[in-house]
Image (spheres, rainbow, N blue to C red):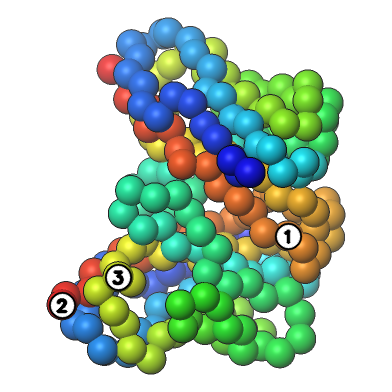
Amino acid sequence: NAGVTQTPKFQVLKTGQSMTLQCAQDMNHEYMSWYRQDPGMGLRLIHYSVGAGITDQGEVPNGYNVSRSTTEDFPLRLLSAAPSQTSVYFCASSYGGGPQETQYFGPGTRLLVL
Amino acid sequence: AQSVSQHNHHVILSEAASLELGCNYSYGGTVNLFWYVQYPGQHLQLLLKYFSGDPLVKGIKGFEAEFIKSKFSFNLRKPSVQWSDTAEYFCAVTGHGSSNTGKLIFGQGTTLQVKP
């Protein structure tokens, strides 16, 4: 199993540009999440999904869209990039709640918005 | 408000020293608690987790954590650190139940530097 994969690893954008961060998992996990990591702030939840076709907002959703058309994929879209979105983005997946819940994280995408 | 606070932002230890990283949380209801580690250049990995039962939880690489409900704390400990423990450590919380799955609340992180 490849686990959770993310592409690209690194991206530079200009203010106002749009892009999609890709996330895929091959573990047949129902739950997937996107977090951003900023210095001194830990990881903050952007959006999450409890299954194909179902998404909801997390703590910091503004400026981001998500969709979940398949169990495997959970792309994160930046509609109009802003310097405040410079961050490291992590995608995570998990099987379910309770004792089984362990979130598996991808390697991250480092985004720089100029 | 739901939150996690890690008291130590940057810890420097010599090899063989004992480690304790503090974590306090604010969360209504029954909680699940986690410690994740991020080694340099790598992605987050689970160190240990608590759901219920014995409040002393043992994880990988000799780490353990104790859940003290009355203090809303979940401190991470290791009796003797190694240089390879140099990493960033994150405490996280979520609530019980499937509605909370995938919605971790993280602390700010603690950077541990172990000197050989």
| Residue highlighted by disc 3 | B84
- The chain identifier of the residue carrying mark 3 reads B
Q: Residue at x 25, y 74 (%)?
A: B83
The C terminus of chain B: image quadrant: bottom left
Q: Amino acid at mark 2?
A: Pro
Judging from the image, mark 2 belongs to the subunit labelled: B
Q: Nearer the viewer, residue A32 or B42?
A: B42
Residue type at mark 1 is Glu
Q: Position of residue B62 (x, y in %)?
A: 46, 83
Dividing the picture into quadrants, the one containing residue A3 is top right
Q: Are marks 1 and 3 on the same chain?
A: no
Foreground tag (1 vs 3) = 3
- Residue B116, label in figure: 2
Residue placed furthest toward the top: A17
Q: What's the residue at 59%, 40% (across, down)?
A: A2
Secondary structure under tag 1 reads loop
Q: Which mark is residue A10?
A: none
Q: CA distance from mark 2 to mark 1?
A: 35 Å
Left or right: B24 in relation to A113: right
Residue B44 visible? The answer is yes
Q: Quadrant of the N terminus of chain B?
A: bottom right
- In this figure, which residue is indicated by the disc labeled 1? A101
Q: Is residue B57 above or below residue A5?
A: below
